[in-house]
Structures are given as C-alpha cells and as structure tokens.
Image (tube, grey):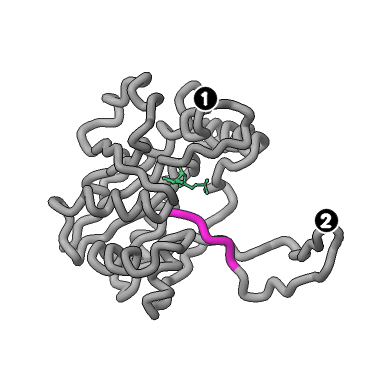
Amino acid sequence: MPRHYAIVPAAGSGSRFGAEMPKQYLPLAGKPLIYHTLAALCRCSRIDRVWVVLSPDDVWWRTYDWACLGPKLETVFCGGATRAGSVANGLLAAQTAAADEDWVLVHDAARPCLSQAMLDALCDALADDPVGGLLAVPVADTLKRADAGQRVAATEPRDGLWQAQTPQMFRYGVLLKALASHPGVTDEAGAIEAAGLKPKLVRADASNLKVTYPADLHLAALILQGAHE
Ligand code: C5P
C-alpha cells in the first residue's frame, strides 16, 4: 500500500499585511496561522509524515513551541527562491522516507482552513487514480480582463474554468521528476501537466481559502471558529 506524506511550502517572505512577519506566522485564532495548516495535516490518520519547508533565514519558527503537533512533523530549513523551488527541496528532504509510488500531498502554509472532510474527499477520489490531482473550485464570478488603466478591456468566458487550491496530490517519483524538469510552474499540477499528464480536479469549496489579503485573515478566523462550534 502506498503511504501518504505531506509537504508544506512555508518559505514565502512576501506580505501584503504591512508587517515584517511573514503571513504564515500572523496570529489567527490565538495561534500562528501555519499552526492550523499543520494541525489539519498532522491530525489526518492517513498521513504518515509532514515536512514543513522553511526559509534558511527563518527567525520566527523557533519562537513558538510546536510539540503539540506530535511526532509526524519534520522541520527543514531548505526553502527556495520560488514556491516550486521550496517544494522541490522539500521532496528531496523526504527522499529517505518516500518511495516513488507513495503519495505526496503538497499544501500551502497559507491555507489554514483545510477540513478533514476535504482531505478525505481528495484522498478517496484519487486512491486509484493513475495521475493524481488537486482540490479546486469552479469559477463562479464573471471574469473581466483589465487594461493598463484598470478599465475593462474584455469579459472572458468562464466555462470550464476552475480555481486551483491545495493540497495537490501526486506520486512522489513522478512529482519529483516533473518539478525538476519544469521549475517555473506556480503549482504542482502545472509541472504534471507540462509532463504530458492530466491531473484530476476534485471539487472543494471556498472555505479552503489562501490568506493573501488582510481581509482573508478575518474570513479565516470566522471559518475556523465555525468549524469548532
Ligand atoms: O505567496 P503565496 O501565498 O502564493 O505562496 C504560497 C505558498 O508557498 C505559501 O505557503 C508560501 O509560504 C510558500 N512559498 C515558499 N517559498 C517561496 C515562496 C512561497 O515556500 N519562495
């Protein structure tokens, strides 16, 4: 039986929050944001180990006690210049544990509201899949293309368009190779597609949001609060 591992790229430094602190450490429901992300993965009985990939310059991780997340968590300070670079380095760090056929779930540190139900839905949908896939949501809003003056240049058809989320789940060996060959991608599915394969879209919902703007932090707090009521 293939095992399931998680890789959490958490080496991003960019922040639209006006703070020096990277967004993955911003306070959310009384804990650092990334705590919630890691807790969702560590608590999932299907996942054997979780590698969190931090920047070599990270000064924030050690200011918090992560012991409560349990023994599955592995911390590595090998983040790269891009998200794809951080994931590729995390995969290499997992090499002694992972076999080519094992599943790897790559999940953004900045998505703290992943539910166990969505994790289960992803693993169930892909258990016998020859390629793997990702959580995603069909685009619901009308899409506008902007010109340089932030005026509408065109209305774009949204038929068949989905917003990619994470986790993205692929076989360890295939993903390692695909990312090495296609390092410029913005998600794992992009590397798998570039390798000529077709990842499966597994329907999720907007609660698995990526914290990008200050308002997202407030929304994430409400979602987490609702999940625990
Ligand atoms: O910036 P954005 O939210 O799109 O980043 C997605 C995820 O990738 C975040 O969890 C971020 O910490 C991570 N990342 C990384 N290494 C980078 C850039 C981003 O691990 N060089």
Is residue 93 in view from this perspective? yes
Prevailing SS of the magenta stretch: strand
The magenta segment is 162-167
Q: Does the magenta stretch include residue 182?
A: no
Nearest to N terminus: mark 1 or mark 2: 1
Q: How many marks?
A: 2
Q: Position of residue 83 (x, y in %)?
A: 43, 51
Q: Do the residues labelled 1 and 2 touch (CB within 8 Å)?
A: no
Query: Is 133 in front, or is 222?
Result: 133
In the picture as drawn, the residue positioned furthest to the bottom comes out as: 196
Tag of residue 134: none
The answer to which image quadrant residue 16 occupies is: top right
In the displayed structure, 156 sits above or below 2; it is below
Tag of residue 150: 2
In the picture as drawn, the residue positioned furthest to the left comes out as: 96
Q: Position of residue 28 (x, y in %)?
A: 52, 27
Nearest-to-viewer mark from 1 and 2: 2
Q: Check disc 2 and report its element: helix, strand or loop.
A: loop
The answer to which image quadrant residue 169 occupies is: bottom left
In the displayed structure, 195 sits above or below 1; it is below
Name the side, left or right, on which 127 lies relative to 107.
left
The residue singled out by tag 1 in the image is 27
Please name the amino acid that badge 2 sits on. Answer: Gln
Query: Is 139 in front, or is 16?
Result: 16
In the displayed structure, 121 sits above or below 38; it is below
> What's the residue at 84%, 63% (across, down)?
152
> What's the residue at 52%, 25% (across, down)?
27
Q: How far is mark 1 from mark 2, CA to CA?
A: 33 Å
Q: Where is residue 185 in the image (x, y as percent from the top left)?
A: 46, 63
Q: Check disc 1 and report its element: helix, strand or loop.
A: strand
> What's the residue at 20%, 66% (across, down)?
101
